[in-house]
């Protein structure tokens, strides 16, 4: 780990040569199938709900155009809930995630539906540390991106310290500081380079976005899951720009909208628990800020974070709001009898992704259409 007050600045400015990064990236390049699938990848909630579709809500608006043709997205796909027959919900007999991504699909839309369903029901196979050779390919498919040229990333890195460099350095050494898996696999130097390069990319695009605290934690799962720094940067940058651009605006307006939605959704699905927390003057602004800002990546263990993100990337990052509500419901009995619930809420219990996702999916149908529409668009 770099010394945040020592000679770290010099070390960060000693950027690796392009040949080193190119060698690392080419050794881990995705199979030819990924770019083909990526060109039309879009997300929907068709596999977990039978609600009618919400009108006039494309899957991605101006954010999807941010990267131009490099990161194509099917704008006809929507975040909104859609009707789904039982035939749509069940993939072909004996279908597995491995079989789906190992050959070109005959029908891309159906293949993506099958992939999301299998992620929801079977999950992505990984070892006890959360390592999976398939995960980063699947995330690339779900985000709809193609491999990034190493030279593009190196050119950003070689520009040196950005205007947000000092802020980045103040946060990186604390990123998942108590997680031995992350510390063993991801260096602080790589996290600094990725965030600094992203700041340059934002500046070049003229986007009203800058480094904000919490982006370091969002970057952590990508760096942990990816097989190269370039790969992690590619996924991270598209994810931020497309899924939660208003989370990284100077005012963090999307995060604050998300916190209000946590309160509204909790009131809708469990009035008793909501009223109890309100009687203690506990709004989501006081206890859920880290979970909303980082899409629950701040709560250990990291292997469970990766499983939860499999679901969020498959069906939409906006569903993290319902995942936060689900965590509250899983703590319901303890919260209702606690004289000081904030002691329990100061740090959420360790993640259990399967249980959280199960509860979150069950909540989708309980959310009124208008409120769900706000949920879908709050991070944009």
Image (cartoon, rainbow, N blue to C red):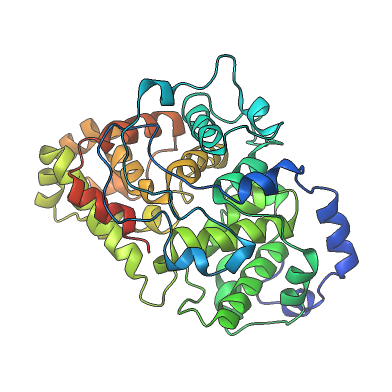
Residue 118 placement, left or right of 162: left
Q: Residue at x 45, y 44 (%)?
A: 312
Q: Quadrant of the C terminus?
A: bottom left
Query: Along the line of sight, which residue is nearer the eye, 5 or 310?
Result: 310
Does residue 181 appear anywhere in the picture? no
Residue 305 placement, left or right of 371: right
Residue 293, image x and y in percent? 41, 59
Residue 189 placement, left or right of 273: right
How many numbered discs?
0
Query: Along the line of sight, which residue is nearer the eye, 117 or 73?
Result: 73
Residue 315 placement, left or right of 256: right
Query: Along the line of sight, which residue is nearer the eye, 203 or 284?
Result: 203
Work out which residue is located at the far front of the displayed protein and give it.
106
Does residue 361 appear anywhere in the picture? yes
Residue 179, image x and y in percent? 59, 47
Q: Quadrant of the N terminus?
A: bottom right
Residue 250, image x and y in percent? 41, 77
Work out which residue is located at the far top of the displayed protein and give it.
93
Q: Residue at x 10, y 45 (%)?
A: 275
Q: Quadrant of residue 124?
A: top right
Residue 264, image x and y in percent? 18, 51
Q: Is residue 102 above or below residue 80?
A: above
Q: Residue at x 67, y 27 (%)?
A: 98
Query: Along the line of sight, which residue is nearer the eye, 327 or 281?
Result: 327
């Amino acid at each position: 780990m770099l010394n945040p007050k020592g000679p770290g600045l010099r070390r960060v400015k000693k950027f690796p040569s392009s040949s080193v990064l190119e060698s690392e990236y080419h050794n881990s390049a995705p199979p030819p199938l990924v770019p083909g699938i990526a060109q039309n990848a879009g997300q929907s909630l068709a596999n977990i709900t039978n609600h009618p579709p919400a009108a006039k809500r494309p899957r991605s608006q101006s954010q999807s155009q941010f990267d131009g043709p490099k990161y194509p997205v099917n704008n006809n796909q929507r975040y909104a809930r859609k009707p789904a027959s039982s035939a749509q919900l069940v993939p072909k007999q004996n279908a597995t995630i491995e079989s789906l991504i190992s050959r070109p699909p005959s029908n891309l839309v159906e293949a993506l539906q099958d992939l999301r369903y299998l992620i929801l029901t079977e999950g992505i196979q990984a070892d006890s540390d959360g390592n999976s050779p398939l995960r980063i390919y699947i995330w690339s498919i779900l985000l709809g991106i193609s491999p990034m040229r190493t030279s593009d990333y190196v050119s950003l890195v070689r520009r040196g310290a950005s205007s947000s460099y000092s802020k980045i350095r103040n946060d990186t050494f604390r990123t998942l500081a108590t997680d031995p898996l992350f510390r063993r696999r991801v260096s602080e130097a790589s996290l600094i380079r990725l965030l600094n390069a992203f700041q340059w990319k934002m500046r070049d695009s003229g986007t009203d976005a800058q480094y904000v605290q919490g982006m370091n934690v969002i970057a952590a799962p990508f760096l942990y899951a990816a097989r190269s720094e370039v790969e992690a940067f590619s996924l991270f940058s598209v994810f931020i720009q497309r899924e939660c651009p208003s989370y990284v605006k100077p005012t963090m307006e999307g995060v604050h909208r998300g916190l209000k939605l946590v309160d509204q959704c909790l009131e809708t699905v469990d009035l008793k628990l909501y009223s109890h927390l309100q009687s203690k003057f506990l709004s989501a602004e006081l206890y859920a800020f880290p979970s909303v800002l980082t899409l629950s990546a701040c709560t250990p263990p990291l292997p469970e974070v990766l499983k939860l993100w499999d679901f969020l990337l498959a069906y939409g990052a906006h569903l993290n709001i319902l995942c936060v509500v689900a965590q509250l419901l899983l703590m319901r009995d303890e919260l209702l009898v606690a004289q000081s619930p904030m002691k329990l809420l100061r740090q959420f219990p360790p993640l259990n992704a399967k249980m959280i996702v199960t509860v979150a999916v069950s909540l989708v149908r309980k959310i009124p259409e208008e409120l769900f529409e706000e949920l879908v668009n709050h991070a944009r």
